[in-house]
Amino acid sequence: KVQRLPPPPPPRLCLPSTNLFLHKMIYCAKLGRYTVPRDPAAGVGSTAGGSAAAQPPSATELRVVEMAKPDSAERQRCQAAFGLLGNPDMGATDAEWKFHHHDFAGALRATKELLKADAFFNGAGCLTTYICSLVELGQKTELFYYAHKLVEGDPSRALSWFAVGAYYSTIGKYDLAR
């Protein structure tokens, strides 16, 4: 008679509750760029155009907003727990969050750090955020240089021509930007 060995215990990161938490953190990071906490005093976030009484934000809403903020302690703790502190995709998500919350200089700084390591890194829309931040800040020279660098690297890529069009739009040549 053969005695079967019990299966090995699953690795720590493969536990269902842990994976669920990791997925929730990443989902909050991506979704959080659109999230604005409701302010009961200002009526922000009220339903039906402000006709209903504004309610304070729920604990879940506040946690989603807190996990979405790139510099929050909650986000840093979660990233450290899962070994994602230096992850470029999380860095690109942070830059995108900053861009969507009108921190164009912060988004540009974050994308520049990522592009130092890999000049053509486009995980989580890093290049798009970089180009759009340059447009918003009116940095024509850097946009010109990077657009030409992208076209030389891969002229068949749509993002390369988006950068060229963004440059022409920034300098006011709208007919060429099309």
Image (cartoon, rainbow, N blue to C red):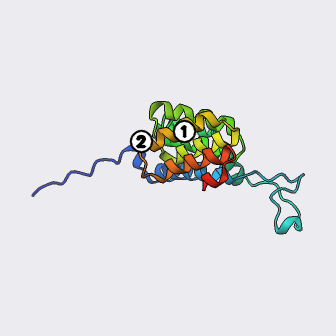
Report the mark closest to the observer, 1 or 2. Answer: 2
Percent across and percent down for residue 103 are 70, 39
The dot on residue 153 is 2
Asked whether, in this view, residue 58 is left or right of residue 78, the answer is right
Q: Amino acid at mark 2?
A: Gly
Residue at left 70%, top 38%? 137
Pick the front one: 172 or 9: 172
Q: Name the residue nearer the viewer: 15 or 113.
A: 113
Query: Which residue is pictured at 50% across the width and 40% down the height?
Result: 148
Q: Callout 1, which amino acid?
A: Gly
Measured Cα–Cα span from mark 1 to mark 2? 23 Å
Q: Which mark is residue 127?
A: none
Residue at left offset 81%, top offset 66% = 47
SS assignment at label 1: helix
- Residue 94 image position (x, y, % from top left): 60, 41
In the rendered image, the vertical position of residue 105 relative to residue 129, given as above or below? above
Residue 3 drawn at (x, y percent)? 15, 54
Q: Which disc, if any, is residue 91?
A: 1
Q: Does any portion of residue 72 appear in the rendered image?
A: no
Query: Which type of secondary structure does the marked residue at label 2 adopt?
Result: helix
- In primary-sequence order, the first of circles 1 and 2 is 1
Residue at 43% x, 41% y: name it.
152
